[in-house]
Image (cartoon, rainbow, N blue to C red):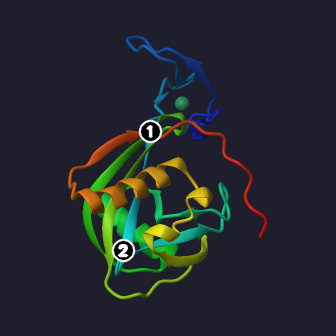
Amino acid sequence: MSDRSNFCSACGQPVATVVPEGDNRPRSVCSACGTIHYVNPKLVVGSVPEYEGRILLCRRAIEPRKGFWTVPAGFMELGETLGEAALRETWEEALARVELGSLFSVVDVVHAGQVHVFFRARLLQPEFGAGAETLETRLFRPGEIPWEDLAFPSIRIALEQYLENGRSGNVEVRLQAAPRVRLGAAPQA
Ligand SMILES: [Zn+2]
């Protein structure tokens, strides 16, 4: 929730934190033009790309959690659909073209002001690489997934759900909440 500014994006004057009339929580309100700057949760969209029973993971080249493993995922952009965001992130981070499947996991990450959603995805060819924000990209069999070195709790939740769906045949979307955790330091390279 770092997108709070001390200045109004409409007129450049300082903002104050007050509860606007008729509202019930503090907002950033411009002292000059009165614009209320609402801050709302952000959507993070990811995919779990599979190829012949193996799952594609990326090792992060950027903070936070540099050096830890994730599925391709990132902030949704204006002007795109959830599916387009998942495809774009999969290309940008893993240089992989996938066939998107259904949405299967929604994770509330309340402490970060985010909602993370994950799609099933299928790699048509074992072709992938490391995008600008990725150190390396690899296919993992379920038994090889580096659970201790995953970047974020939501990634663990999504991967666990994905594998459980494979065993149980569940096709419904599951909504879960990410625990608040203190993230450790990145491993030494
Ligand atoms: Zn203003």
| Inter-mark Cα distance, 1 to 2 | 29 Å
In this view, the residue in front, 173 or 62, is: 173
Quadrant for the C terminus, please: bottom right
Looking at the image, is 117 positioned above or below residue 80? above
Residue at the (52%, 78%) spot, across then down: 138
Residue at the (29%, 55%) spot, across then down: 104
Q: Which residue is mark 1?
A: 41
Instruction: Please indicate whether residue 36 sits to the left or right of residue 79 in the image.
Output: right
Locate residue 90, reporting x and y percent.
43, 71
Check the image and name the residue furthest to the right: 188
At label 2, which amino acid type do we have?
Glu
Query: In which of the image's four quarters is ligand 1 placed?
Result: top right
In this view, the residue in front, 7 or 172, is: 172
Residue at the (48%, 55%) spot, across then down: 155
Please indicate, yes or no, whether residue 77 appears anywhere in the rendered image.
no
Classify 10 Å Cα crowding around label 2: few (below 14), some (14-19), many (20 and above): many
Q: Which residue is mark 2?
A: 50
